């Protein structure tokens, strides 16, 4: 029981850490006008889903109302929203019309997502530490 709860909290820690890494990558590339393929950098987002494993033990646990739980990363997707345009005919990446296509990364959105991810990570740490404390207390009762 305690190990399942620790695994759930641990999966949240892992998922939010990856999300923070992707957000950091977005912020680092917010001015990259020529990425792979000659196009501007495209913002990336992380897609989460509930972690379920189809094993016999998990099936039995689900029948008793205590499924494996947790979170997993399904994909890291590119944001398909339009690129920003900036008029700069002196830029080597400018088109014939003088406009430079800039990445679709918005600093405010990324910082908001980073704060949300950081708070989720912090909540998972708190849950993990609470579970660890309960486990330690339970083991001390048996002494």
Image (tube, rainbow, N blue to C red):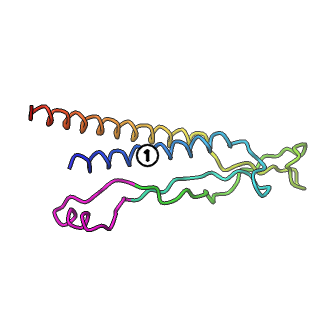
121 and 135: which is toward the camera: 135
- Residue displayed at 26% across by 63% down: 58
State the image coordinates of residue 94 (x, y, percent, origin top left).
86, 50
- Residue displayed at 88% across by 54% down: 97
Q: Which residue is mark 1?
A: 14
18 and 84: which is toward the camera: 18
Numbered circles on residues, count: 1
132 and 65: which is toward the camera: 132
Query: Is the C terminus in the top left, top right, bottom left or bottom right quadrant?
Result: top left
Residue 135 in the figure: left or right of residue 106: left
Quarter where residue 90 is shown: top right
- Residue displayed at 67% across by 53% down: 42
State the image coordinates of residue 61 (x, y, percent, origin top left).
21, 62
Which contiguous range is marked in magenta? 50-71
55 inside magenta stretch: yes
127 inside magenta stretch: no
Helix or strand or loop: what does disc 1 sit on? helix
Residue 8 in the figure: left or right of residue 21: left
State the image coordinates of residue 8 (x, y, percent, origin top left).
32, 49
Residue 125 in the figure: left or right of residue 87: left
Q: Measured along the vertical axis of the image, is residue 29 above or below residue 62? A: above
Q: Residues within 10 Å of mark 1 (few under 14, many from 20)?
A: some
State the image coordinates of residue 48 (x, y, percent, origin top left).
44, 56
Residue that lies at the very extreme toward the front in this rendered image? 143
């Amino acid at each position: 029981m305690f190990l399942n709860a620790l695994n759930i909290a641990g999966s949240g820690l892992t998922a939010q850490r990856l999300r923070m890494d992707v957000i950091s990558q977005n912020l680092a590339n917010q001015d990259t006008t020529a990425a792979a393929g000659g196009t501007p950098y495209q913002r990336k987002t992380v897609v989460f889903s509930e972690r379920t494993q189809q094993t016999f033990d998990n099936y039995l646990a689900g029948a008793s109302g205590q499924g494996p739980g947790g979170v997993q990363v399904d994909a890291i997707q590119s944001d398909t929203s339009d690129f920003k345009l900036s008029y700069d005919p002196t830029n080597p990446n400018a088109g014939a019309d003088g406009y430079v296509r800039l990445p679709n990364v918005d600093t405010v959105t990324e910082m908001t997502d980073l704060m949300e991810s950081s708070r989720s990570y912090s909540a998972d740490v708190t849950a993990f530490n609470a579970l660890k404390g309960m486990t330690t207390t339970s083991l001390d009762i048996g002494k």
